[in-house]
Image (cartoon, helix red, strand yellow):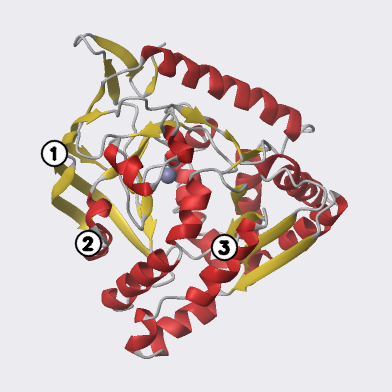
């Protein structure tokens, strides 16, 4: 077996044993595209070896997705896929874990009419809202991972042969998830403990506000009372831990939906809905975006902001040091799973219920009453840089350094 194959084996084990931590008798759903078929076959094998009851794979294909956007009638983008949501919800109620393998071309929907993309996102977001709430309140174990596709690899590593690009992207992914190490599972135990030490410190400080400054950014974010900083691992409704993103380098909490003011500039391109938004700046008043500017992809950005009222507000506040390993790799992935773990980021859209004390047991209305944002969308965007400073403001107005020059200050 080649070194690459060996590392991919370790990756599959890591996803099954640490990512979703499959239990004997548990069902599993895998969302993946045909580009990642080899990894998916391995995942299915490892899942059954770990005692899975059944594994349902939902296949997608970039070429077919593109064809639909080019040729399907307009009305088709207005239909909520209730049949799909129903199936996923039923499996989730039975305790099924879910793995999503991302590998799409970051430019997949370039040139497609914006209205079709927005309509799809709205109807899909609505149909999936109950399922998404189950995920965002830890009812089920879920894990998002990645595998290369040729198109994605070509975007990340332009200028070499197709084969070299593909292998380079595999190597970059495997390094980011620590599968270049002999004992990735042990490495993850240590990494999770380190991240949890950061979140415990922040939870003890109970900051009222965060103040971000950097070139193009002067932003104040109020945090809701009872907010919880969380990292890497979560505990599902049955008490089983899982890691929702592989890789993950972030420590994150919820923003107070009406407590964001000032302006913030992006520091990495955002691939959203098959299009790229780059060099953008958002201005907030009372929590809501009142002005959006972008050098590239303004129409796509405006489509995102128009999804619903909550899409104009911040749900998630995440801290990632500029010196994190993915950031140090200096690779621009054009994929949020990686780029968000190389940079401080925020998310437009829904907050996670588990970022509030008692939130996992609350209704959407109660979460909103406690200051958390609700929305049919959740999109992370990157704002971190080596020039970013962040202060935590305590209840009595004292400013304490959290980040200096892009890195942890405590
Ligand atoms: Zn995040
Ligand atoms: Zn997020």
**Which residue is drawn at the image coordinates 53% and 81% (left, top)?**
64
Q: Is residue 333 visible?
A: no
Judge whether 313 appears above or below 66 on screen.
above
Image-quadrant location for residue 17: top right
The Cα–Cα distance between marks 3 and 1, rounded to whole angstroms, is 35 Å
Mark 1 lies within 8 Å of ligand 2 (Cβ measured): no
Q: Is residue 225 visible?
A: yes
Mark nearest the camera among 3 and 1 is 3
Q: What residue does disc 2 label?
A: 306
Could you classify mark 3 by the number of other residues whose Cα lies within 10 Å: few (under 14), some (14-19), or many (20 or more)? some
* For marks 2 and 3 on the same chain, the one whose residue lies earlier in the sequence: 3
* For marks 2 and 1 on the same chain, the one whose residue lies earlier in the sequence: 1
Could you classify mark 1 by the number of other residues whose Cα lies within 10 Å: few (under 14), some (14-19), or many (20 or more)? some
Q: State the residue in front, 12 or 360.
A: 360
Q: How many marks?
A: 3
Q: What residue does disc 3 label?
A: 89
Mark nearest the camera among 2 and 3 is 3
């Amino acid at each position: 077996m080649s070194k690459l194959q060996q590392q991919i084996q370790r990756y599959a084990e890591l996803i099954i044993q640490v990512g979703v931590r499959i239990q004997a008798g548990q069902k599993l759903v895998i969302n993946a595209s045909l580009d990642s078929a080899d990894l998916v076959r391995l995942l299915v094998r490892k899942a059954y070896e770990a005692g899975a009851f059944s594994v349902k794979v939902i296949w997608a294909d970039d070429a077919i997705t593109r064809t639909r956007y080019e040729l399907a009638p307009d009305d088709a983008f207005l239909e909520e896929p209730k049949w799909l949501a129903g199936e996923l919800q039923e499996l989730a109620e039975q305790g099924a874990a879910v793995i999503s393998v991302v590998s799409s071309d970051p430019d997949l929907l370039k040139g497609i009419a914006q209205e079709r993309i927005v309509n799809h996102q709205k109807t899909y977001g609505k149909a999936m809202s109950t399922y998404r709430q189950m995920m965002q309140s830890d009812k089920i174990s879920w894990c998002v991972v990645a595998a290369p596709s040729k198109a994605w690899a070509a975007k990340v590593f332009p200028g070499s042969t197709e084969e070299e690009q593909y292998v380079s992207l595999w190597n970059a992914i495997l390094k980011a998830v620590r599968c270049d190490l002999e004992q990735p599972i042990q490495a993850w135990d240590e990494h999770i403990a380190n991240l949890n030490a950061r979140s415990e410190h922040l939870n003890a400080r109970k900051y009222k506000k965060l103040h971000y400054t950097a070139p193009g950014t002067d932003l104040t974010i109020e945090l809701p009372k009872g907010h919880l900083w969380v990292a890497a691992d979560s505990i599902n409704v049955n008490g089983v831990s899982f890691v929702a993103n592989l890789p993950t380098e972030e420590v994150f909490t919820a923003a107070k939906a009406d407590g964001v003011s000032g302006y913030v500039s992006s520091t990495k391109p955002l691939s959203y809905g098959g299009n790229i938004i780059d060099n953008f700046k958002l201005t907030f008043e009372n929590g809501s975006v009142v002005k959006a500017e972008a050098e590239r992809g303004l129409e796509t950005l405006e489509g995102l902001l128009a999804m619903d009222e909550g899409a104009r507000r911040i749900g998630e506040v995440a801290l990632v040091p500029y010196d994190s390993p993915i950031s140090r790799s200096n690779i621009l992935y054009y994929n949020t799973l990686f780029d968000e773990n190389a940079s401080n980021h925020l998310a437009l859209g829904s907050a996670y219920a588990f970022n509030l004390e008692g939130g996992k047991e609350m209704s959407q209305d109660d979460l909103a009453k406690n200051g958390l944002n609700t929305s049919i969308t959740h999109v992370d965007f990157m704002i971190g840089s080596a020039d970013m400073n962040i202060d935590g403001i305590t209840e009595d107005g004292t400013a304490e350094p959290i980040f200096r020059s892009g890195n942890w200050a405590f």
